[in-house]
Image (cartoon, rainbow, N blue to C red):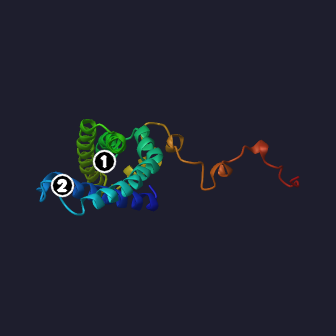
Amino acid sequence: MSPFERVLLYASAVAAAGTGGVYIWMKWLLPATDPFSIVHHPWQPSVLSWHVLVAPFLVFALGLITREHIIGRFLEGRPRRGRATGVLAVVPAAAMIVTGYLTQVLTDAAARKAMGIAHAASGALFTLLFLAHLVAARPGRRAANGAASARGAAGGTAGIGLALLRLDRLGRRGIESFPRSRTAQAPTGGRRP
């Protein structure tokens, strides 16, 4: 994961979890001060607006890391720290995204309330599993003899090189950086047309 992807993911996850948690606290845990109002706190509509504005950044960040970090490492097959928590975090993330959009578009009050509860539950579960993934995937101490790092550089123990499983672009310049075959290159010593 690039530094940009990491910062975007962490910042958007903190912003979405923070605004979502504050909104849940205001809506469901604070007592109503006015019996004729559905708003329990004066900032409740603003916090919901902030949550709706920052959540797409989290969806974008998750989409940005899906190809290389989520699917690529899942297909890699070799055991890694944090793999279990990462795989487990994908399910509530998908549920959180779907229920978040459905909460905004449903018009039936009962269905909207059910989606809101499902969104809050899946969002809380995703946040906990994401934190567990960060703790579990933290880089540990390297092996003293370097065997683990040499095995990782060779592409794992599955016999399939890591280059075959990478799902990212072919290089910094995209398809232009793909090595051409020797027959397609100009002959040595001759001029190119």
Q: Looking at the image, which residue is at 35% across and 59% down?
A: 10
Q: Secondary structure at mark 2?
A: loop
Residue 113 picture location, percent across and down: 24, 41
Q: Which residue is mark 2?
A: 37
* Earlier sequence position, callout 2 versus callout 1: 2
Q: Residue 166 vs residue 74: left or right?
A: right
Q: Which mark is residue 82?
A: 1
Number of marks in the rendered image: 2
Characterize the local packing of mark 1: few (<14), some (14-19) or many (20 or more) Cα atoms within 10 angstroms.
some
Q: Looking at the image, which residue is at 43% across and 38% down?
A: 75
Q: Residue 49 vs residue 191: left or right?
A: left
Q: Quadrant of the N terminus?
A: bottom left
The image quarter in which residue 97 lies = top left
Which of the two residues, 61 or 2, is positioned nearer the viewer here? Answer: 61
Q: Which mark is residue 91?
A: none
Q: Looking at the image, which residue is at 24% across and 56% down?
A: 23
For the residue marked with disc 2, what is the amino acid?
Ser
Say if residue 144 shows up in the picture. Answer: no
Which of the two residues, 20 or 173, is positioned nearer the viewer here? Answer: 20
Q: CA distance from mark 2 to mark 1?
A: 45 Å
Q: Looking at the image, which residue is at 17% across and 57% down?
A: 40
The image quarter in which residue 7 lies = bottom left
Q: Tell me: residue 66, above or below residue 21.
A: above
Q: Secondary structure at mark 1?
A: loop
Cβ atoms under marks 2 and 1 closer than 8 Å: no
Which of the two residues, 111 or 193, is positioned nearer the viewer here? Answer: 111
Report the mark closest to the observer, 2 or 1.
Answer: 2
For the residue marked with disc 1, what is the amino acid?
Gly
Residue 51 picture location, percent across and down: 32, 56
Q: Tell me: residue 80, above or below residue 30.
A: above
Residue 67 picture location, percent across and down: 47, 45
